[in-house]
Amino acid sequence: MKLIKAKKEDLPLIVEIIKDAQDLLASQNIDQWQNGYPTKSILLDDIQNMESYLLTDAKGFPLATAMFSTKGEPTYSKIDGDWITTGQTQYGVIHRMAVSKSYRRKGIAKFIFNAFETMLAKSNIKSMRIDTHEENYSMQKLLKGSEYSYCGIIYLMNGDKRLAYEKLIQ
């Protein structure tokens, strides 16, 4: 498997993988990503900002997508709880991660987490933060199994509540 930066021509593939995730969340009665988010415009912005990634197999077939950044997340500036790291500490953040329906439960998400954590370690960035819907138990299980610590509650720009996690990077 290989994690590569997505290109504009990859947008239809990314949209398809995101649609798979939206369908899965809907089937679990989780209202996350059920209101048109993330839009094609948001996904295109991720690509143009060089923050959109595809995970491909050995033949280049896309298995998953994610947004990864070290530019900070505005909604993380206020938390009902406490981040492990505080102040102006730089951190990584993962958003809009989705695995194609044919490749779920094969360690793909864990592979993506490890790849981004390795990027942070090489850049001497000591923390990764991520948030998830309170009913997204699969992601919560993944976070716990990947040694992320629950830090509290953050609120998205639209007011939606999310559970916030952080991991110190060695």
Image (cartoon, grey):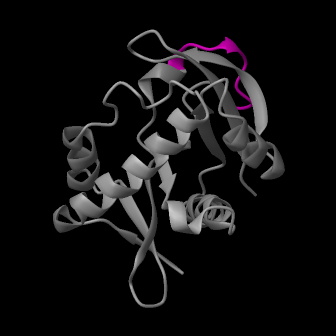
| Residue 80 placement (x, y as % from top left) | 67, 10
The residue under the point 25% across, 55% down is 47
Residue 49 is one of the magenta-drawn residues: no
Q: Please indicate whether residue 18 sits to the left or right of residue 145 in the image.
A: left
The residue under the point 51% across, 24% down is 31
**In this rendering, is residue 149 above or below 31?**
below
Residue 79 is one of the magenta-drawn residues: yes
* Residue 26 shows up from this direction: yes
| Residue 4 placement (x, y as % from top left) | 39, 72
Q: Please indicate whether residue 102 sits to the left or right of residue 39 in the image.
A: right
The residue under the point 30% across, 65% down is 6
Give the magenta range: 77-86
Q: Nearer the viewer, residue 140 or 49?
A: 140
Q: Quadrant of the C terminus?
A: bottom right
* Residue 86 shows up from this direction: no
Q: How many marks?
A: 0
| Residue 20 placement (x, y as % from top left) | 44, 51
| Residue extending farthest front | 27
Q: Quadrant of residue 150?
A: top right
| Residue 2 placement (x, y as % from top left) | 49, 79
Q: Quadrant of residue 79?
A: top right
